[in-house]
Image (tube, rainbow, N blue to C red):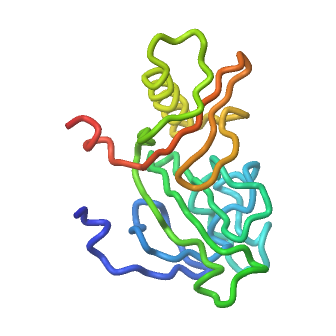
Amino acid sequence: MSQQQQQSPTRYDPTASVSLPELVVGDRIARAVVPPAHDVDADEPRSKHYHTDSDEPFIGRIVARNTRHNDIRHCLVVDEDAGMFARLSAHAKSQAWTQTEEDWKVRDLGSVVEVVDVWDTEIADADEPDEFVADWVEILFSNVRHGEDPGDEIDHFEGDTFRLRDHDGRRAAVKYELVDEEETQQ
């Protein structure tokens, strides 16, 4: 069990100053701490987007977010300075019965997006489609971690699954988890 999972969960209110390396799985984060959309820069003050008295920056930049009208919201956030990702989920504001349900909850943390499963692969030019997808994900998220935008390559994001696609017609469904870089080198 990692050190992050041994600590007890914390709730960060809308004015809290927090970064991804401080979080542990299970922590709850007020809506105002997470950017509301892909095009919101992590350095923008929260008060510009939310009714809050905090000019603190957001915890990171949204890489992917489910956009369909779901009761549960999911997003993947990157902190480029720390080189970390966090997978978050929360009830939609209209579906939340309590503040606890409305808060974002940290589901997974790590510096690398690692492929766990691949299906519905449409990659005609690859001898080993699963390996091609794993390499595609590694390159895509390494670039994201270093400031690039994933563009249209991530589609149908649902927390720990998403579809990859490119302009050459390649497609694949992916289940992933976040791991620390040291764990991938063992």
Query: Residue most toward the left?
Result: 186
Q: Is residue 23 left or right of residue 70?
A: left
Q: Is residue 178 left or right of residue 105?
A: left
Residue 67 percent location from the top left of the image:
76, 55
Quarter of the figure with the C terminus = top left
Residue 32 percent location from the top left of the image:
68, 73
Q: Nearer the viewer, residue 16 or 170?
A: 170
135 w.r.t. 39: above or below: above
Quarter of the figure with the N terminus = bottom left
Q: Residue at x 66, y 38 (%)?
A: 154
Residue 114 percent location from the top left of the image:
41, 40
User: Which image quadrant for residue 173?
Assistant: top right
Q: Residue at x 42, y 57 (%)?
A: 109
Q: Is residue 107 left or right of residue 1?
A: right
- The image shows a total of numbered marks equal to 0
Q: Is residue 149 left or right of residue 2?
A: right
Query: Residue most toward the bottom?
Result: 98
Q: Residue at x 58, y 66 (%)?
A: 89
14 w.r.t. 130: above or below: below
Residue 176 percent location from the top left of the image:
47, 45
169 w.r.t. 9: above or below: above
Q: Residue at x 51, y 40 (%)?
A: 145
Q: Nearer the viewer, residue 63 or 48?
A: 63
Query: Residue most toward the front?
Result: 120
